[in-house]
Image: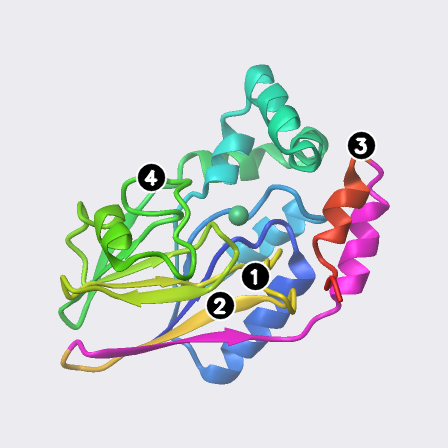
Amino acid sequence: MKIAIISDIHANTLALEAVLNQINSFGADKIFCLGDILMAGYDPNGTAKTILELDNLEIIQGNTDKMVACFSQELLEKAKNKFPCMGYALEDDLKIIDEKYKDFVRNLPENRYIEINGLKIQLVHGSPRQQDENIYPNLALNDVEKMVENSNADLILCGHTHIPCGYSLNSGKTVVNVGSVGRSMTEDKMPYWALLEINNDGTFQIEHKSVNYDNVKVSEIIKNRNFKHSDDLAKMYIRSN
Ligand SMILES: [Fe+2]
């Protein structure tokens, strides 16, 4: 069975479409989405519509989905102080996101277990112990082990940091951060996802994938949304060199 895993789309429909085309070319049977579909991009409603039309989708809630769904003035002010372009993007997003999509992400689970051919898989956004914990590349194996110690899964799939990476732990668990479709923090700024292939005996292979898309166009559209600090958000889509 082939499963495509996507995460952190962040209202970037162009990037999502490029990834879905690539996923189709691999003939995936299912798609797992690890959250953060709506906030701080250019097209939250279009992205949500595209996600909801997918067949064989399993989806969980990301930390920024929760911010959109459980918004409060206090949370907004905190976000504006901590990371201004995200806070002001959230404020602007709240004006345009359809209530039905807010309800949709509000009701998503924070994590879930799925078993396929005996392989126990856990879907999380940040880590099994915290929705917004960062599983970055080059962490000490013992630290990652602690982050996943409350998980019973063989394979833990996560996103949140927008940087793909993976760990084979001494406990036998495998942890894969699939990266971000919509606002990649990799040097190339391209959308990342992962292709998981599970054999009949439960053994598996998993590989990071990426695809080209028009990041310059998306950056321009975001800049033109014209909320405070939208130019800072727009810069995050462009390579620094
Ligand atoms: Fe994210």
Q: Are marks 1 and 2 in contact (CB under 8 Å)?
A: yes
Q: Which amino acid, mark 4?
A: Gln
Residue labelled with disc 2:
193
Q: Residue at x 59, y 32 (%)?
A: 99
Q: Residue at x 76, y 67 (%)?
A: 241
Residue 109: x and y, percent? 34, 41
Real-space CA distance between mark 3 and mark 1, rounded to the nearest whole angstrom: 24 Å
**93 in the magenta segment:** no
Q: Which amino acid, mark 2?
A: Trp
Whether 226 is drawn above or below 184: the answer is above
Q: Secondary structure at mark 2?
A: strand
Q: Which amino acid, mark 3?
A: Lys
Whether 239 is drawn above or below 152: the answer is below
Real-space CA distance between mark 3 and mark 2, rounded to the nearest whole angstrom: 30 Å
Question: Start and end of the magenta stretch?
Answer: 202-226
**Label 3 crowding class (10 Å Cα cut-off): few <14, some 14-19, many 20+?**
some
Residue labelled with disc 3:
228
Earlier-in-chain disc, 4 versus 2: 4
Real-space CA distance between mark 1 and mark 4, rounded to the nearest whole angstrom: 21 Å
Residue labelled with disc 4:
130
Looking at this view, is 81 or 53 the one in front? 81
Q: Residue at x 79, y 63 (%)?
A: 216
Real-space CA distance between mark 1 and mark 2, rounded to the nearest whole angstrom: 6 Å
Residue 170: x and y, percent? 16, 64
Earlier-in-chain disc, 3 versus 4: 4
Real-space CA distance between mark 4 and mark 2, rounded to the nearest whole angstrom: 21 Å
Q: Are marks 3 and 4 in contact (CB under 8 Å)?
A: no
